[in-house]
Image (spheres, coloured by chain):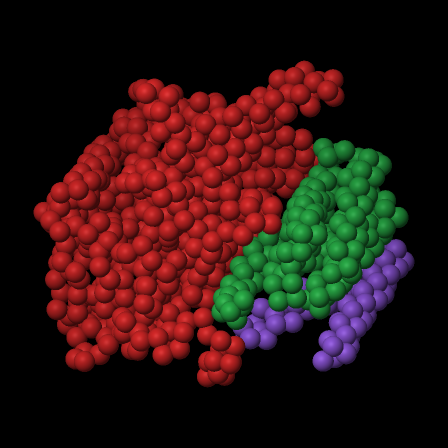
Chain colours: A green, B purple, C red
């Protein structure tokens, strides 16, 4: 492999551009979620919140937080060439993501004492969790692709941009929930 | 050399774990604050910002964006 | 024979895509109907069926064109070439109707599509303008008037966004010495997603229309016919294109500049494209969100903007204008960049105050984020918001004034020559001045309370758009035409275009302002003959048709010259910009040998000054080994 160094430096040049591109996408997406948060406080203020289950809220928040930890662990592992930990942690992240979706869409939406058309607070609750869940779903699909390609041995400590991108995106989805959780569950009274 | 890489790896895992502990503590605090002190929205926003700061810095590696091409990780 | 012919048609991406679109719509409708059937509801309900159908249709379109192929292969874990290639069998016009990853081809695709829907929107305008030539209802029912008026607005906005995309796609990589955009596949995606967007916008004509104007305010938009939903979806996809295109422009400018091309040595057009992209990247999300919320309100009975459910229609206006005001800077900034770019070339003088002009674009973009509520002085929002927004609005005049003073000072004592591009630039400056001067009365609360929603606003807005986009865009087309085609346009026809369009535009715009001050409301298909504005309306209509004729002349000129025009000399405008140092049309991989920037961009008339060194001898190989990279970083 005499071309190793030149392709590697090519890869790194691409990497800086790719990172910038991903962060620009995240900034753009953040404006979407920012708009939702603004809508929530514009319509409900800090005194009212949707009447959602506190327990489910805390549980799904913990699940997502834990998934972020495992995502970070997976990325650290591949960066240091620890394939076994990488595949395992990635799978855990993915499963936690699915669990989060089940918790929000399967449990919370089902047990909520209101439907999407029962007033502004209800509409906001379904829209905000819905937009977020859609992002989690796309993140889960992304992770599944990375997991499958990881099993084929496509990533190395030097070249694993796909893993890094999936990780950064996943953490971004977590950051969104960091703001959505108090906005939907903690601030105000039902 | 190998031992060095092994050490760096352990260090990186440990760093990731300590961020988790920090975030978990903040989340518990947030939950307690939210359920005890109704109407205290400002500290909740503060905690959210703090959590977001740690995730963006330590998990999303924002500083990497500004690192040169030659230094990775 | 016929089989081969059919295969031939579907070897072209656009036609394949349109077939995919139809299939997608049908599948989407089927999915909705099936889901409704399974949950015990009557199978057919038009609104959800069309919405889901349209989303599936857009996906079908993108899949069928083949623009997603490389990403699919990445997902499967396959490698693709670093520089994606279009289907090499496609030649001539077929290349432009199919997926290409070359920024120059994409730029022309953008430009052509832009002119196409620009003409379409112009046609809508002429139709309802003819209706307005006389008071009373002649041939256009009021509902149709509303739909055409709304479509004129939004299709024009689409045309302008695509035109801006055309300029930044074609010019930015060439001007900064790059060989393509940072993300060629994303670039192609961003272009092609416009096509279903445009199809959906036009489909509103056949789905009951919509009568809200392009602003789509609820509660009216929550009750408008089905066309409203297709309008939302159309805007959504065009907005998505704008976001992804902006992302690409920023990444290109930040990371792909040629050696020596520091930020303050970039051509001024690149600065404006940069500022434009920052707005497009961020603010566009908010119009997408506001329209989606109305969409959900219609689909699921949600209550964001419905006061009886605890919602508030004013919220929509805040979200909507947070994009839609900065959007007008998206429309004009690149145009103003063209003016600053061309003036020094035709005045043979350095651009006056380069740094100030460069930063003024950012000034306009950033202040532009803080002015949105000046559209809402009469909306019933909290009154204390009025005065701060008035001041921030008037503040926009400062960076805009910087540009004007720079233009005037650049012209001052220059050796001007008046070819068609220069004429359009000067026309743009004069019209943008009219647009600028008619602005403060709308920004000041006390006068705006009277001017809100009158034809005065229509006149003001058209002046800013013609001065900030239409005239500069035509200037850019004529100026870069020899670069794109290698041939010269017909100068006589170009000048005829200008001398018809400029006076006609003044008649139209000043007439609109006049009837507005005399009491004509905007967006109304009829007016009281007692207002005494009938003659003005007739003049405005005639002027509109003259503009239409002038644009047809331009199209004839461009189409004919592209084929039979005389072959252009190497650098007809004696420009210093790097793209003019290449052969025309530009070779496929722009700067094969790499360039190096060694001087200032606009030192026209200064003896011995050099901007670009075209054949930069590669003392160090471009993919620098780590050690050299480090040294370079340290030197930075």
Horizontal side, residue C616 vs residue B3: left or right: left
The structure residue drawn at horizontal position 60% and vertical position 60%, both measured from the top left corner, is A161
Q: Looking at the picture, does residue C33 appear above or below residue C248?
A: above
Residue C412 position, x and y percent, is: 18, 70
In the rendered picture of this protein, how many numbered marks are placed on residues? 0
Please state, as top left, top right, bottom left or bottom right, where the N terminus of chain C lies in the image.
top left
Quadrant housing residue C56: top right
Residue furthest to the front in view is A1
Instruction: Please say if C536 is above or below A133.
Output: above
Residue located 44% across and 41% down the image: C192
Image coordinates of residue C619 in percent, x first then y, are 36, 79
Whole-percent x, y for residue C361 in the image: 39, 64
Residue at position x 79%, y 73% from top? B10
Residue C618 can be seen, yes or no:
yes
The picture quadrant where one finds residue A157 is bottom right
- In the picture, measured across the screen, residue C284 lies left or right of residue C311, that is left
Q: Residue furthest top?
A: C42
Q: Position of residue A103 (x, y in %)?
A: 81, 43
Of A148 and A167, nearer the camera is A148
Residue C412 visible, this orientation: no
| Left or right: where C353 falls relative to B44 | left
Viewer-proximal residue, C501 or C109?
A: C109
**Residue at point 24% right, 76% down?**
C610
């Amino acid at each position: 492999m005499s071309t190793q160094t030149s392709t590697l430096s090519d890869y790194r040049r691409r990497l800086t551009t790719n990172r910038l591109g991903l962060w620009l996408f995240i900034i753009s997406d953040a404006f979407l979620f920012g708009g939702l948060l603004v809508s929530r406080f514009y319509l409900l203020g800090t005194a009212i919140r949707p009447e959602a289950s506190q327990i489910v809220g805390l549980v799904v928040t913990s699940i997502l937080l834990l998934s972020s930890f495992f995502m970070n662990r997976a990325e650290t592992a591949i960066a240091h060439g620890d394939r076994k930990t990488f595949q395992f942690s990635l799978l855990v992240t993915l499963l936690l993501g699915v669990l989060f979706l089940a918790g929000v869409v399967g449990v919370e939406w089902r047990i909520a004492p209101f439907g999407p058309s029962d007033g502004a607070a209800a509409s906001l609750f379904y829209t905000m969790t819905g937009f977020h869940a859609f992002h989690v779903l796309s993140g889960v699909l992304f992770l599944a692709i990375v997991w499958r390609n990881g099993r084929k041995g496509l990533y190395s400590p030097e070249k694993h941009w796909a893993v890094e991108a999936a990780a950064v995106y996943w953490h971004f989805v977590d950051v969104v929930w960091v703001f959505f959780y108090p906005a939907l569950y903690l601030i105000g009274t039902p | 050399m190998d031992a060095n890489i092994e050490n760096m790896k352990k260090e990186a895992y440990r760093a990731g774990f300590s961020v988790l502990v920090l975030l978990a503590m903040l989340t518990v605090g947030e939950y307690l604050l939210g359920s005890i002190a109704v109407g205290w929205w400002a500290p909740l926003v503060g905690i959210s910002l703090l959590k977001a700061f740690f995730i963006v810095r330590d998990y999303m590696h924002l500083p990497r964006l500004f690192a040169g091409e030659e230094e990775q990780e | 024979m016929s089989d081969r012919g059919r295969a031939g048609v579907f070897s072209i991406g656009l036609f394949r895509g349109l077939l995919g679109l139809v299939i997608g719509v049908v599948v989407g409708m089927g999915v909705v109907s099936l889901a409704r059937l399974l949950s015990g509801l009557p199978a057919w309900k038009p609104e959800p069926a069309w919405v889901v159908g349209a989303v599936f249709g857009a996906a079908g379109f993108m899949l069928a064109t083949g623009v997603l192929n490389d990403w699919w292969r990445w997902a499967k874990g396959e490698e693709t070439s670093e520089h994606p290639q279009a289907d090499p069998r496609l030649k001539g016009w077929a290349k432009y109707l199919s997926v290409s990853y070359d920024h120059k081809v994409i730029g022309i695709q953008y430009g052509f599509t832009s002119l196409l829907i620009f003409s379409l929107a112009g046609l809508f305008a002429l139709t309802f303008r003819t209706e307005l030539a006389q008071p009373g209802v002649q041939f256009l029912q009021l509902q149709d008037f509303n739909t055409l008026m709304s479509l004129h607005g939004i299709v024009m906005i689409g045309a302008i966004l695509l035109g801006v995309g055309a300029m930044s796609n074609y010019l930015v990589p060439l001007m900064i010495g790059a060989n393509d955009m940072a993300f060629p596949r994303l670039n192609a995606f961003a272009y092609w997603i416009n096509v279903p967007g445009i199809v959906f916008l036009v489909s509103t004509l056949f789905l009951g229309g919509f009568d809200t104007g392009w602003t789509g305010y609820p509660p009216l938009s929550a009750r408008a016919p089905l066309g409203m939903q297709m309008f939302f979806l159309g805007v959504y996809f065009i907005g998505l294109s704008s976001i992804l295109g902006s992302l690409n422009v920023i990444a290109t400018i930040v990371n792909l500049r040629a050696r020596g091309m520091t930020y303050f040595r970039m051509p001024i057009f690149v600065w404006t494209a940069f500022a434009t992209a920052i707005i497009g990247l961020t603010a566009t999300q908010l119009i997408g969100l506001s329209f989606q919320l109305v969409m959900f309100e219609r689909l699921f009975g949600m209550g964001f903007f419905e006061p009886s459910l605890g919602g508030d229609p004013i919220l929509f206006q805040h979200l909507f204008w947070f994009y839609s005001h900065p959007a007008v800077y998206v429309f004009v900034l690149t145009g103003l960049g063209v003016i600053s770019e061309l003036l020094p070339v035709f005045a043979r003088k350095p651009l006056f105050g380069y740094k100030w002009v460069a930063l003024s674009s950012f000034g306009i973009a950033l202040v532009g984020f803080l002015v949105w509520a000046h559209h809402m002085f009469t909306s019933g929002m909290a009154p204390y918001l009025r005065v701060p927004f008035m001041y921030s609005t008037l503040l926009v005049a400062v960076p805009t004034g910087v540009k004007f003073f720079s233009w005037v000072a650049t012209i001052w004592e220059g050796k001007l020559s008046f070819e068609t591009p220069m004429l359009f630039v000067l026309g743009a400056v004069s019209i943008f001045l009219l647009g600028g001067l008619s602005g403060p009365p709308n920004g000041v609360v006390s006068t705006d309370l009277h001017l809100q929603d009158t034809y005065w606003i229509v006149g003001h807005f058209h002046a800013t758009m013609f001065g900030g986009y239409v005239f500069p865009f035509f200037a850019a087309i004529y100026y870069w035409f020899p670069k794109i085609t290698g041939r010269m346009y017909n100068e006589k026809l170009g000048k005829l275009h200008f001398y018809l369009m400029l006076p006609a535009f003044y008649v139209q715009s000043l007439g609109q302002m006049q009837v507005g001050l005399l009491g004509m409301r905007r967006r109304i298909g009829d007016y009281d003959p007692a207002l005494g504005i009938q003659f003005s309306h007739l003049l405005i209509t005639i002027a509109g048709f003259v503009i239409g004729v002038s644009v047809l002349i331009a199209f004839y000129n461009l189409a004919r010259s592209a084929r039979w025009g005389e072959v252009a000399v190497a650098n007809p405008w004696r420009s210093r910009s790097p793209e003019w140092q290449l052969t025309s049309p530009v070779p496929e991989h722009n700067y094969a040998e790499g360039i190096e920037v060694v001087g200032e961009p606009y030192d026209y008339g200064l003896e011995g000054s050099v901007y670009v060194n075209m054949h930069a001898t590669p003392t160090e190989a471009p993919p620098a080994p780590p050690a050299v990279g480090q040294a370079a970083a340290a030197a930075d």
